[in-house]
């Protein structure tokens, strides 16, 4: 697949993208971002449109959060990644100057939704990360990547966030590492990130999962980080503090840490 390298401010691998599951308040976003930036991380994540299982749960602050994320860009210099699930999200995110978009697991399962996003990205050159579908279906994951590619998107990355399973497991979403590894075998030039937060579902599982991804030579990590994780409005049990993030990054054993050209 003819892809271009992701044009990101981070040149060193693993590329770390960190930030809260959800943008909750302007203060939470800015405080978390400042603490993350202080540890040298250059890419920030936050969800403003949250796909939730049931209505009535916190569904994200919506477009108002874009102004907070613009402040993050301006005040910390970090690039910002957000989740998009509809054409309107894409239009609003692009208009606000967001740096990276990602397609969530609940969207990747739906070819109509992915096609709508792909169509709305025609003619743009923003990096787009595609999370694996919730179900362990590699073809569906590849299909989503192909839809973006056909629309002319050339900076594409994949995010492994684990898979829904009925098996009893310590994980929120079982890793099934052979699936992202097979994706890499089929599309060797596709950067692959691991999201240990959504695989683990609990704080204590995140560091070992991150190390496993690095041992498999993943290109980067997407880690949910919140300045007060236990009070988070979504995914509280799997978010870590900026301080724990810093420790996790320092303790990662990275073989042949490479500098990307
Ligand atoms: C998220 O990153 O907060 C999210 C909703 O993830 P996923 O699509 O992997 O469930
Ligand atoms: Mn989350």
Image (spheres, helix red, strand yellow):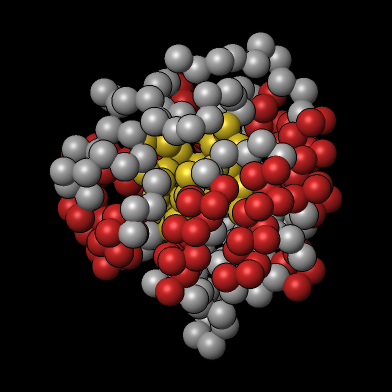
Spot occupied by residue 26 in the image (x, y as percentages of width and height): 57, 70
**Residue depicted at x 70% and y 70%:** 232
As drawn, 64 above or below 31? below
| 84 lies left or right of 50 | left
Residue 53 is situated, as x and y percent measured from the top left of the image, at: 53, 75
Instruction: Give the number of marks.
Output: 0
Q: Within the image, what quadrant is residue 111 found in?
A: bottom left
122 in relation to 4, above or below: below
In which image quadrant can residue 226 be found? bottom right
At 57% from the left and 66% from the top, the residue drawn is 22
Residue 120, can we see it?
Answer: yes
Quadrant occupied by the C terminus: top left
Residue 99 x %, y %? 39, 46
Residue at the (50%, 17%) spot, across then down: 260
Rendering quarter of residue 130: top left
Residue at the image point whose x is 53% and y is 88% from the top? 56
Position of residue 131 measured from the top left corner of the image (x, y, whole percent)? 47, 48
Near-viewer residue (34 or 212): 34
Residue 162 visible, this orientation: no
């Amino acid at each position: 697949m003819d892809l271009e390298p992701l044009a990101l401010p981070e040149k060193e691998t693993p590329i770390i993208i960190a930030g809260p599951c959800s943008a909750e308040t302007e203060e939470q976003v800015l405080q978390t971002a400042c603490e993350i930036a202080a540890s040298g991380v250059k890419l920030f994540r936050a969800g403003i449109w949250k796909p939730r299982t049931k209505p009535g749960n916190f569904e994200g602050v919506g477009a108002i959060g874009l102004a907070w994320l613009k402040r993050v860009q301006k005040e910390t210099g970090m690039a910002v990644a957000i989740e998009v699930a509809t054409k309107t999200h894409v239009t609003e995110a692009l208009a606000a100057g967001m740096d990276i978009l990602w397609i969530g697991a609940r969207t990747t399962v739906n070819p109509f939704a992915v096609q709508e996003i792909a169509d709305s990205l025609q003619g743009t050159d923003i990096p787009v990360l595609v999370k694996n579908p919730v179900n362990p279906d590699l073809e569906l994951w590849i299909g989503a990547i192909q839809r973006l590619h056909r629309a002319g998107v050339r900076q594409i990355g994949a995010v492994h966030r684990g898979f829904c399973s009925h098996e009893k497991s310590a994980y929120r979403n079982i890793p099934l590492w052979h699936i992202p590894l097979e994706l890499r075998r089929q599309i060797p030039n596709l950067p692959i990130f691991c999201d240990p937060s959504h695989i683990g579902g609990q704080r204590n599982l995140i560091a070992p999962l991150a190390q496993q991804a690095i041992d498999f030579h993943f290109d980067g990590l997407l880690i949910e980080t919140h300045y007060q994780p236990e009070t988070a409005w979504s995914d509280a049990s799997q978010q870590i503090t900026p301080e724990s993030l810093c420790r996790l990054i320092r303790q990662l054993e990275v073989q042949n840490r490479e500098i990307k050209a």
